[in-house]
Image: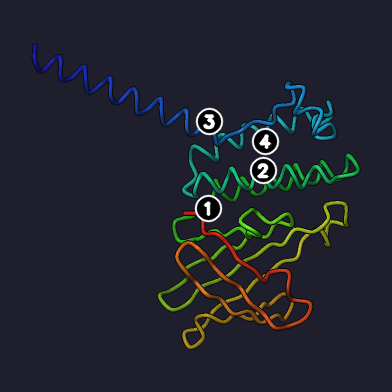
């Protein structure tokens, strides 16, 4: 009888933890709530009937990413909020469609790739996420070498090739805190601190990636 009571208690605890986990997960897998009047009013273009199918796909992908990714869940939430602000700038349905597809690509990356050796950083200004989003990914290649990938988002109404500014660079064993962007020939100095990355440059025209970034772990 005692063992049965203990077993029941364990099952209860496991059930509570499971429900708590699912509740936390669903809080990050936020759907596009076009059935809510306030959301529909704020995101009228996004909530158009012609995007109903792709919105459903995106909601499903968001839930899947939240359940299976090994990237930080807070990263999914913050990038979702940044994406909503970004897509809100669209002036045409073509722009909205492009950004829906881009978010699908982002979620595919979080779902399909091993994120355990990747550190994600988002740019902050005055203690808040930068209004012009910048996302850095730091990949640990070897003990003495890292790969730095970055995307700085511009106006979503631009042509597809000028909507973002890319960054791609590698450190070398003898210059662990200095990188040269292979995309734009910009040189940056990296200062890794506790949960923060500071990126500096003295080159004009390279300031877009300069700033303070918060680590998501």
Across and down, in percent, residue 145 comes to 48, 77
Marked residue nearer the N-terminal end (3 or 1): 3
- Marks 2/1: CA–CA distance: 22 Å
Q: Which mark is residue 113?
A: 1
- Judge by depth and name the residue closer to the eye, 207 or 63: 207
Q: Calculate the distance from the C-alpha at mark 3 to the C-alpha at mark 1.
A: 21 Å
The circle drawn on residue 58 is 4
At mark 2, the secondary structure is helix
The image shows residue 151, relative to residue 13, as above or below, that is below
Q: Which residue is mark 3?
A: 26
Name of the residue lying farthest toward the front: 126
Q: Is label 2 or label 4 in front?
A: 2
Please tell me whether mark 1 or mark 4 is closer to you in this view: 4
Residue in the picture at 75% in, 65% down: 165
Residue identifier under label 2: 81
Of marks 4 and 3, the one in the foreground: 3
Which element carries disc 3, helix, strand or loop? helix
**Mark 2 or 4, nearer chain start:** 4
Of pointers 1 and 4, the one earlier in the residue sequence:
4
Residue extending farthest to the bottom is 174
């Amino acid at each position: 009888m005692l063992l049965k009571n203990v077993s029941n208690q364990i099952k209860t605890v496991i059930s509570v933890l499971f429900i708590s986990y699912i509740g936390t997960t669903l809080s990050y897998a936020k759907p596009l709530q076009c059935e809510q009047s306030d959301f529909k009013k704020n995101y009228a273009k996004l909530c158009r009937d012609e995007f109903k199918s792709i919105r459903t796909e995106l909601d499903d992908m968001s839930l899947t990413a939240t359940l299976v990714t090994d990237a930080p869940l807070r990263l999914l939430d913050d990038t979702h909020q940044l994406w909503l602000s970004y897509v809100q700038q669209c002036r045409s349905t073509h722009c909205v469609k492009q950004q829906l597809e881009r978010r699908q690509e982002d979620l595919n990356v979080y779902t399909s790739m091993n994120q355990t050796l990747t550190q994600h950083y988002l740019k902050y200004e005055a203690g808040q996420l930068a209004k012009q989003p910048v996302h850095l990914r730091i990949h640990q290649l070897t003990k003495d070498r890292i790969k730095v990938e970055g995307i700085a988002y511009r106006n979503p109404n631009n042509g597809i090739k000028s909507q973002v500014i890319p960054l791609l660079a590698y450190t070398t064993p003898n210059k662990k805190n200095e990188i040269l962007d292979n995309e734009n020939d910009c040189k940056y100095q990296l200062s890794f601190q506790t949960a923060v990355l500071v990126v500096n440059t003295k080159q004009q025209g390279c300031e877009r990636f300069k700033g303070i970034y918060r680590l998501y772990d």
